[in-house]
Image (cartoon, helix red, strand yellow):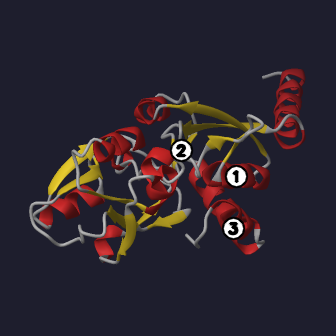
Amino acid sequence: MSRYLLLFLLALLLSTRVAAQGGQPAVLRVLVPTDAAPMAYHDETGRLTGFSVEVVRALCAEIRATCQFDVTNQDEFLDRLQQGRADLAASGVFEMPELRGKLPQANPYYRSLSLWLAGQDVPPGRAGLRVAVVQGSIQEDYARRQGWEPRPVRNSRELKRVLLGGEAQAALVPMIVALHMQKSEAFRRLGLLPTVLRAPELGGDVSFSISPRRPELRQEINMALDRIKRNGAYDRINSRFLPFRVS
């Protein structure tokens, strides 16, 4: 290799590194579920916000990346991440059990609890109750073990439908889902009372899913998550969107 060619290649390598460090910031392509308040939603000005969205924005600031959000149906998350058409999934309404074991996961960014939603005359514990649950969730497994009759649903819209239509007598859902449904006036008119079920198997850690084509993101996201928890940014986001501590 000639001396001039070697110098050219070295210069090209150095310029690439400089661009990566001091040029345009990296772009982090983030999938966000639709209709997912308080985790992800558009506010009255049309701006995308919510607990999960603002946590991702804080992470992007820490790793000096530009967030590029794509609001889409959760059914598309797995394929798009596996195909490298997105880098991160900011899940939050449901725990998305279909992603477990199929994608790299960052460290948990919140811990989910479970709420029993029912009328005063329908306490948890009676065998044969028709209970709405998220399909494939830890709540569905628990309901079956209790001898209840699960009514599996795929999203919050179906959950409201089966409760409003009387197809289920109660619901067992993650606390975040219960908060989301409370935004519906029709749902509030049902007068369902929330009860936290403290069974250990009904709590679970929720993490961001990462594209297998971006494995290096796991360490970057984990380190950034630690930093925003130490510097108070995470707690400020928690207080802004949720009425309880989730870390």
Q: Is residue 42 rendered to the left or right of residue 65?
A: left
Query: Quadrant location of the C terminus?
Result: bottom right
Residue at figure coordinates x 23%, y 50% from the top left = 168
- Badge number at residue 36: 2
Q: Earlier in the sequence, mark 1 or mark 2?
A: 2
**In the rendered view, does 57 fall on the left or right side of 172?**
right
Whether pointer 1 and pointer 3 mark residues with C-beta atoms closer than 8 Å, the reply is no
Is residue 53 visible from the viewing direction of this image? Answer: yes
Instruction: Kindly identify which residue carries mark 3.
Output: 239
Examine the rendered structure and indicate whether residue 41 appears above or below residue 124: above
Alpha carbon separation for disc pair 1 and 3? 12 Å
Q: Earlier in the sequence, mark 2 or mark 3?
A: 2
Q: Position of residue 195 (x, y in %)?
A: 37, 72
Q: Nearer the viewer, residue 26 or 232?
A: 232
Q: Is residue 113 left or right of residue 202?
A: right
Residue 8: image location, x then y, percent: 87, 24
Q: Amino acid at mark 3?
A: Ser
Helix or strand or loop: what does disc 2 sit on? Answer: loop
Q: Position of residue 142 (x, y in %)?
A: 21, 64
Q: Position of residue 215 (x, y in %)?
A: 54, 46
At label 1, which amino acid type do we have?
Glu
Q: Is residue 227 visible?
A: no
Q: Amino acid at mark 2?
A: Ala
**Cα gap from disc 2 to disc 3, whole angstroms:** 18 Å
Residue at mark 1: 54
Select label 1 or label 2 by which is in front: 2
Label 1 vs label 3, nearer the camera: 3
Q: Residue at x 77, y 56 (%)?
A: 62
Q: Residues within 10 Å of mark 1 (few under 14, many from 20)?
A: many
